Image (cartoon, helix red, strand yellow):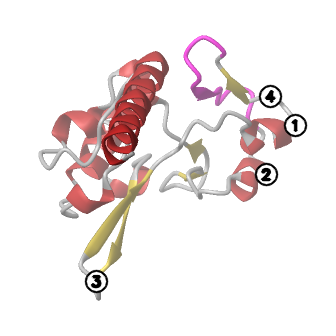
Amino acid sequence: MLDVEKCTGCRACEYACSFKHTDLFNPLDSRIKISEFLDDLVFIPSVCTQCNEAYCVGVCPTHALSKNIQNGVVEFDSNKCIGCKQCIIACPWGSIKLNHTAKEIIKCDLCGGDPECVKVCSAKALTFSDVEDMVMDKQNRTAVQYKNTAQAAHLGG
């Protein structure tokens, strides 16, 4: 999950990501990108959202991209990729891009469930939870909000 208000624009996440995947500190090969809006001093991390209905998967003619039904991650098999770049065009978030050599696509794979970007984010702008944990958290927040609304209505009525 992303908390845009906490991002300081330090780019540690970009460097950690690129190093994890390429053994080089090269933000061009990072699966996460920090967009800067300096007029407002806002930094926005963008990363693959692992869409439920992933357009990139649907347009891939060789099935190099597929949705792992167990963990929800859109996975990339470079051995199947023919370099058509349809996935790059299809992604509404711009989360799939070419690596610095422009020879292969790169996209977030959540580092196998232990994202490096989250580990190095000292501002805690990036967090990672399993889908089940996120659903449970949302249910708990909704229940608390409902309880508070019901109590307020009871006290006011």
Q: Identify which residue, 45 or 144, lies in the foreground.
A: 144
- Name the front one of labels 4 and 3: 3
Q: CA distance from mark 3 to mark 1?
A: 41 Å
Looking at the image, tell me whether mark 2 or mark 4 is earlier in sequence order.
Answer: 4
Task: Determine the secondary structure under disc 1.
Answer: loop
Q: Amino acid at mark 2?
A: Gln
Q: Which corner quadrant holds the N terminus? A: top left
Q: Are marks 1 and 2 in contact (CB under 8 Å)?
A: yes
Pointer 2 residue: 86
Most extreme residue toward the top is 70
Pointer 1 residue: 61
Residue beneath the point at 43% across and 34% down: 146
Task: Determine the secondary structure under disc 2.
Answer: helix
Q: CA distance from mark 4 to mark 3?
A: 41 Å
Q: Are marks 1 and 4 in contact (CB under 8 Å)?
A: yes
Pointer 4 residue: 63
Per the rendering, the mark at residue 116 is: none
Looking at the image, tell me whether mark 4 or mark 3 is earlier in sequence order.
Answer: 3
